Image (cartoon, grey):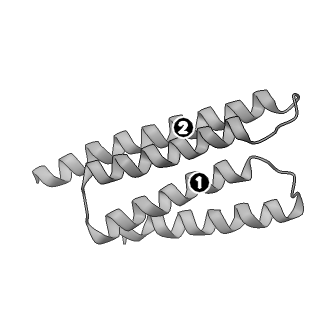
Amino acid sequence: MREGIGIIVGSSILILANLMSLGDPTFSYRIIIILGLLFSIIYGVFEYKEYYNQIVYSIILAVFLIMIWALYFIQPVSPMDEMFYLFVTGFTTLMLLGISLYVFIYWRKKSDV
């Protein structure tokens, strides 16, 4: 059951994030949150299929991080919200990197057993 947790949690929070953004269409952080949650769904798929290729996972992580930071530089944000937007982008980046480090350690321990 642990394999499907990433898919279930990521999907449900992704749906909630989209519903929250319907109330406020100017909520500019939703795209970063959605990308972070899509990455958790991808992790769930890797676990479900028991596919532990770290190179493919790293490439997917790099693509998501490039998309997140490209959105930071492309998307217009009011000067008042720019610091908070930078905080959300940085926090999401650190969170994805931390989770990926944990995943690599977990996969290494799982392959040693």
Residue 55 position within the rendered picture, expressed as x and y whole percent measured from the top left: 27, 48
- Disc 1 marks which residue? 35
If the image is split into quadrants, where does the C terminus sit?
bottom left
Query: Local crowd at mark 2 within 10 Å, few (<14), some, or many (≥20)?
Result: many
Q: Residue 3 at x, y = what percent?
A: 36, 67
Instruction: Please say if 25 is above or below 15.
Output: above
Is residue 79 among what the camera can see? yes
Quarter of the image where the N terminus is located: bottom left
Identify the residue at horizontal 59%, vertical 54% (top origin): 35
Q: Residue at x 61, y 32 (%)?
A: 90
* Position of residue 16 in the picture relative to residue 45 (left or right): right
Query: On the picture, is 78 further left or further right than 101?
Result: right
Residue displayed at 20% across by 46% down:
108
For this view, does 71 lie left or right of residue 41?
A: right
Question: SS class of the residue under badge 2?
Answer: helix
Tag 2–tag 1 contact (CB < 8 Å): no
Question: What residue does disc 2 label?
Answer: 93
